[in-house]
Image (tube, rainbow, N blue to C red):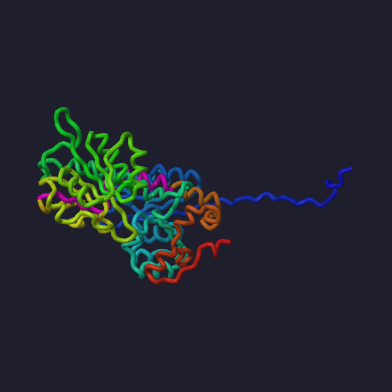
Amino acid sequence: MNLQFLMPQEERLEVIKHKSNLLIGIPKETLYQEKRICLTPDAVQSLVLNGHQLIVEAGAGILAGYTDKEYADAGAEVTHDTQKVFKCPILLKVEPLTLSEIELIEPETIVLSALQLKTRTTEYFKALSNKKITALAFEFIKDEGGSFPAVKSLSEIAGTAAVLIAAELMSKENAGKGLLLGNITGVPPTEIVIIGAGTVAEFASRTALGLGASVKVFDNSITKLQRLQNRLPHRIFTSTIQEKALTKALRRCDVAIGALKGKNRTPIVVTETMVSLMKKGAVIIDVSIDTGGCFETSELTTHENPTFIKNGVVHYGVPNIPSRYAKTASLSISNIITPILLQIADSGGLEELIRHDNGLKNGIYVYHGIITNKPIADWFHLEFKDLNLFLY
């Protein structure tokens, strides 16, 4: 007789996750030239149908092409009361909170927004700490593959847009040479030089090749160049960044796109002397301008006054290119944030979700007022504590 069945057995109890109902606030963006919004009306409707409540500040989606009526019809509460929006326990913003906005929010609020680390100050992190805020940065959140979906998505927009903007600037009306970007029968194709071989370069190359342009890409990473070649529909000219080869390419090109990124400031690889050798009426689109730019002649410009001419070359130095296409960028951000919010609710709260979601956990840089991102703590000389110490 098998006596095993007579022995005491381990009892297995079903673990039930308690779903949370979220109250989410979406304030109007106040930063100059910021036109995007975190959630589209369709995303709001999806969240409302799942039992969540959203309060949207009146006019928050106007510049992205979404009316207050669309948000109201989707089930959100639309209000002119800014303070009511900031009292919500979860806040969604495209741009980081300002110090005055931090004063409006309640202690222990969860904030999802971009961080834009290079524009932050010590006072910003101290203000978050004083309110015991938990803050997540879009650009730090990872997906299952270990990549950064928000950064990649906005880089795709910036890369595609860079070529389209260049096409506009090449017209005679915009001080260009009056060339059509592309390949017309009997006319030599437009030549484009791209410095950098990341996501911006990939989508700039795809767009340029689709229009029939000739593309040359320079980067000091052979791995990035190989990956770029493998992802494009056909082979293009690639090279490491060598002054002689780069200068020769720049002298012949009609458009030059800066798509380099650095850990701190983007390295300058194109000197003013090299720019002066370019064709008169050629166009420079420095997508790297938000981190300093990789052209020595680059300067920050605005959407209202996007260009200037130096050494006979048209320069475009707007730092927030995706905001130019606010509706597309808003859709892209919304597609990333909506599943995260639903997962937070289904898991019973943010704390429960980040116990097993390392990608989302990577996005947290302040947890209940404590700095949990070591590079940020080191950079701003703040006290750091490992997030894992609070979760397990």
Q: Position of residue 100 (x, y in %)?
A: 34, 66
- Observer-nearest of 105 and 319: 319
Q: Quadrant of the N terminus?
A: top right
Residue 324 picture location, percent across and down? 26, 47
- Residue at the farthest right position: 1
> In the rendering, at what x and y percent does residue 374 appear?
44, 65
Q: Is 110 within the magenta?
A: no
Q: Say whether residue 170 is left or right of residue 38.
A: left
Image point 26% across, 40% down: which residue?
A: 237
Choose between 122 and 97: the one closer to the eye.
Answer: 122
Part of the protein shown in magenta:
312-337
Which is the main secondary structure of the residues drawn in magenta?
helix
Asked whether the viewer can see residue 62, the reply is no
In the rendered view, tell whether residue 34 sits above or below residue 214. below
Identify the residue shown where x is 29% and y is 60%.
265
Identify the residue at image location x=50%, y=47%.
Answer: 51
One can see residue 207 in this view: yes
Position of residue 353 in the picture relative to residue 262 (left or right): right
Q: Position of residue 191 (x, y in %)?
A: 19, 40
Report the front residue among 391 and 251: 251
Specify the quadrant that holds the C terminus.
bottom right
Total numbered badges shown on the rendered structure: 0
Q: Nearer the viewer, residue 2 or 35?
A: 2
Residue 325 located within the stretch drawn in magenta? yes
